[in-house]
Image (cartoon, coloured by chain):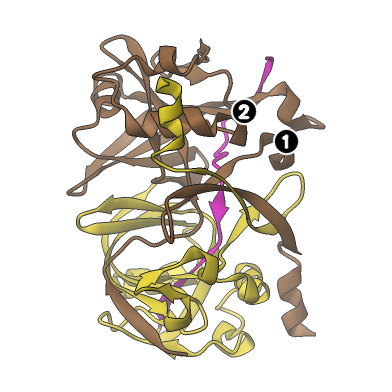
Chain colours: A brown, B yellow
Amino acid sequence: MGKTRIGATTLIYPMPTVLVGAHVDGKPNFLAIAWCGVAGSQPPMVSVALRPDRYTLKGIRQNWAFSVNVPSVDLVKEADYCGIRSGAKVDKVAACNFNIFYGNVDDAPLIEQCPVNLECRVVQMLELGSHCLIVGRVEETHVSDDCLTDGRPDVDKIRPFIFVTEPSRRYQAYGEIIARAFSVGLELEK
Amino acid sequence: MGKTRIGATTLIYPMPTVLVGAHVDGKPNFLAIAWCGVAGSQPPMVSVALRPDRYTLKGIRQNWAFSVNVPSVDLVKEADYCGIRSGAKVDKVAACNFNIFYGNVDDAPLIEQCPVNLECRVVQMLELGSHCLIVGRVEETHVSDDCLTDGRPDVDKIRPFIFVTEPSRRYQAYGEIIARAFSVGLELEK
């Protein structure tokens, strides 16, 4: 199998689209980003990477607090909008008709319509060149009641989506189940 | 819409499964992880979170180098296996019949069968409690020739998959296209 070198890139699959929220000058704003990951479990930590000129980053620096909101396929239009426009120019909460609520962290605005919401306090900010990598400790998770099964978050009800850039910039739903995890690999030992 | 607090968690969707590679005591080893993200674009940076007792982490500490290999659905069995067994006890490269190759970074072993391979040098290691968050600068990307369209990586040919934990631990393929990115959001302004 031949390989081609395409230069240094950040090709990781699948890419999420999440809405990062913060209070900027006391007002909630949200930014859609794909560069978000988990950084640890005890304590629960997540990381988000933002360009230094992002309006939302200004708010995160002001309060050392932010939220991560996972949109469902029903919110793809609003999520996309939050990645196109800047809060410096438009009121995204109004444009998207987001209902905002709060948990334990005063300056981490949460979007009621998003099925999953994480409220976070900043632990570290790493300046990595084009982006600032923010590591946040998750203080609480909120899940929409209609996305729970036996009290646990259920991806089939949450219906998150995937961000794709090539061969075209688009969003895709989750597809078919291909195997059981922590199970199918054991077939290699048979 | 009601919300339920489920405690502090790291619920981000979608979650990847990637194979992180390193030389441990001079021998290639690979670990499947879900906690991997992008940290910046210029220079290209990725982050991976590993538990301190991971055999692969030992190798990353030895050489300050690692690889990120994106498996396709065809490799779900091998990827799952690399998340179940430890390189301290089994030779995963042999068990999975991986063909190993190298690019610019001597101690970043790459898996030929994976359609996308990133070779990385460690920039920072953050000890965050249960996990060590490793930020790596990507030095080169390798893509299988049959996964390129007009010289660019094509997700429809790469066929990556998603890791799911609830309502059951499983892997899912990419599903239907639901909207155009950087486009559908503009409908909110009409």
Instruction: State which chain disc 2 sits on.
Output: A
Q: Is residue A64 left or right of residue A187?
A: left
Q: What amino acid is found at the position of numbered circle 1 in the picture? A: Lys
B66 in relation to A75, above or below? below
List x then y, in percent, for residue A67: 44, 26
Q: What amino acid is found at the position of numbered circle 2 in the picture? A: Pro
Task: Name the residue furthest top.
Answer: A26
Task: Tell me the residue that label 2 is attached to.
Answer: A115
Q: Quadrant of the N terminus of chain B?
A: top right
Q: Is residue B79 left or right of residue A63?
A: right
Task: Tell me the residue that label 1 is attached to.
Answer: A157
Q: State the image quarter where residue B28 is shown.
A: bottom left
The local secondary structure at tag 2 comes to: loop
Q: Which segment did they paint magenta?
A: B1-24
Q: How many marks?
A: 2
Instruction: State which chain disc 1 sits on.
Output: A
List x then y, in percent, for residue A97: 50, 14
A148 in relation to A28, above or below? below
Q: Disc 2 vs disc 1: Cβ atoms closer than 8 Å?
A: yes
Asked if the stretch drawn in magenta spans residue B14, the answer is: yes
